[in-house]
Amino acid sequence: MNKLCLLGLLVGLASHSALADTQSELLKNKDAFVGDLLKQMTVDEKIGQLRLISIGPEMPQPQILKEIAAGRIGGTFNSITRAENRPLQDAAIKNSRLKIPMFFAYDVIHGHRTIFPIPLALASSWDMDAIALTGRTSAIEASADGIDMTFAPMVDISRDPRWGRSSEGFGEDTYMVSRIAQVMVKAFQDQGANAPTSLMASVKHFALYGGVEGGRDYNTVDMSPTRMAQVYLPPYRAAIDAGAGGVMVALNSVNGVPATSNTWLMQDLLRKEWGFKGVTVSDHGAITELVRHGVARDGREAAKLAIKAGIDLSMNDSLYGQELPGLLKSGEVSQAELDNAVREVLGAKYDMGLFENPYLRIGIASEDPADTNAEGRLHRDAARSVARKSQVLLKNDNQTLPLKKQGTIALVGPLADAQIDMMGSWAAAGVPAQSVTLNDGIRRAVGERARVIYAKGANLTHDQKIIDYLNFLNFDRPEVIIDPRPAKVMIDEAVAAAKQADVIVAAVGESRGMSHESSSRTTLEIPASQRELISALKATGKPLVLVLMNGRPLSLGWEQQQADAMLETWFTGTEGGNAIADVLFGDYNPSGKLPVSFPRSVGQIPTYYNHLSIGRPFTPGKPGNYTSQYFDEEQGPLFPFGYGLSYTDFSLSELTLSSRSLKKGDTVEASVTVKNTGKREGETVVQLYIQDVTASMSRPVKELKNFQKIMLKPGEQKIVRFTIDEEQLKFYNTQLQFAAEPGEFNVQVGLDSQAVKQQSFELM
Ligand code: BGC
């Protein structure tokens, strides 16, 4: 601990409380400390601890300070500098009766000041060290800004790309998302949530938020218990097992019961079965929404349901404050129920190290940074290196890529020079003015060696309804800048640039607001204004590279026919333009793989790869034969899960298993030889899938069980080995028992989920 802070704290404690000595003795034992504090608290002070408010225009600062001093606020979110948080902490420590520290939270989702690629992009790296680096860097930056808790990681499995929050999650696969959940929690909390450079993780949105019907945000979730257990719940559990101190409860209902009033979810599953010992927090205004969900007649009942079900902290909701005193008086809510919630909040503050030092992350004023957005080169370099790894090469005919740093490049598209969009949604305290656009990145990369002609070519969309919506998302500034020139004039300008160029690079896709909370879509197409631009560019006959920016899988069948090369960059963050240029010019050989399937059209949703076996699977080459298909569309995804190209080529040998049978407690080793058959050094991801061929219930046609990312020099080959044990064969059966069943298992290894080598063994 910073000595000055410790001194300040001791002086503070000694001056205000005769309890100082006993308190420091008690501090050694969390339960004893929290229990002792609880005994000293009035009912109002207890209720105050459950209140988490958003710093914003709704409540002016003097009022906040008064409320804190009166013990009526437990924590805040959305204040993001030490200077902003210090007076709030002072109000608690100097002016409140019990001097219980405040805690400060924020949505640190993919970076804090240095913005990393969006989570869906991070998952595309299949690189756990890179992902850990983003979590650690974010925690270092945010904790240095006086923040104690992040509302992350968001580990909602999403199989429906219409859902705008697909961008915030890590894709469709349970194994992958669970691994990332663990990595992120450990990175945020590093040496423990009480370390000065740690953020307490609160995993969200518990539970099943990604399963909203129709991909429409906040909609109902109705799901079988086996699917929940098998597919959607494991990532939350993984985060909790990794030590996440908090859980944010989802806005949706689960089989008819809103998560916020769902006793089964928060008590039976979370606390009793999973043994979660941390704090639960409602999502924004969720307690009030219980009335609109139709499970509470009024605010009083909503508060009662929420606290009884297990919501500890209420986020931006005044109902606990208004209703709990009456509910306690009438006996509808017991003192024990209130105390349970307060105990968790105090426990979380204890775990964050705030009782020992309320200024642990706020520090002292004289040490406040003069410029909070002057992050070091180290963080920028980390952002660039992760952003390189997060891009996925979808198509590359005739070696269009990498580009040469010579000749003339026509750079076009509404996203080619859009700083705000590089950041993606939930860009925390990142400053758009610092983000490197593709225009900047390409120019820096080529210097004087090549000529770059930039023309916007098209607006994001012609559709005023969409523009109005996107601008509404950001009240204080327009989210989408619309060029007032007629579409034809803009296209003509881009075509003129293309005609002078050796190659066209077109940055197209979605604005960041299109893949955001509440931004659900009914189509997955690139907006028409941009498709018109692509058509005109294609007509020039010049090689066309599409640099895609988007926060969800798009349906790109038509674009695939137009383009010579397509690079999925998602939203790459502060260093995005540099990182994309690194890939375009071959300073980095792309190694990303899709963490989610790309459907051909919206009607094909869901297209997730790990679907169950069915009685009439589609049989290729036999149309109209009463098998499961869409007769008006090619079958299967446009780009499968796990897919991604490189500038080099890899070959895979046949798969070898060390044994054709597996006894309980034993292992089988699966091995393949991977060879770099191309001319460049490159990385690829070797993926292990397993299928339980016959079981007591239908099982997925394949499930990812492991992967290894390996680097190979030209001509080099490596044997990649995977160890398979019984644990990986277990699943939740109809009785919800997690067990492996004897019988045949197919093992598949590939560089994507479709082109695999297969062998099988028997579990004895
Ligand atoms: C979102 C949460 C977020 C919270 C606080 C809500 O609208 O659903 O994911 O953490 O706001 O910003």
Image (cartoon, grey):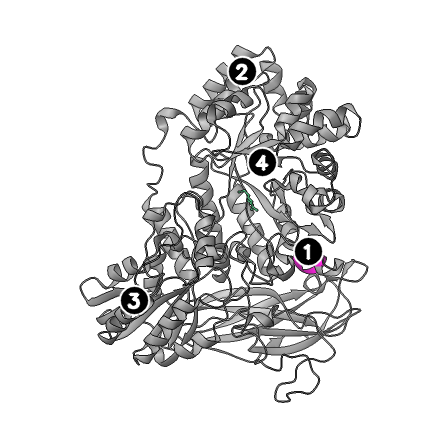
Of the two numbered discs 3 and 1 on the same chain, state the one appearing first in sequence: 1
Of the two numbered discs 1 and 2 on the same chain, state the one appearing first in sequence: 2
Which quarter of the figure is the C terminus placed in?
bottom right
Of the two numbered discs 4 and 3 on the same chain, state the one appearing first in sequence: 4
How far, Cα to Cα, is label 1 from label 4?
24 Å
How far, Cα to Cα, is label 4 from label 2?
30 Å
Question: The disc labelled 1 sits on which kind of residue?
Answer: Val
Of the two numbered discs 1 and 4 on the same chain, state the one appearing first in sequence: 1
Question: The disc labelled 2 sits on which kind of residue?
Answer: Leu
Q: Which residue is mark 4?
A: 316
Crowding near pointer 4: few (<14 within 10 Å), some, many (20+)? many
Crowding near pointer 3: few (<14 within 10 Å), some, many (20+)? many
Disc 2 to disc 3: CB gap under 8 Å: no
Q: Which residue is mark 3?
A: 490
Q: Which residue is at a point 59% across and 67% down the rendered structure image?
A: 722
Q: Which residue is mark 2?
A: 13
Q: Position of residue 698 (x, y in %)?
A: 75, 70
Q: Secondary structure at mark 2?
A: helix
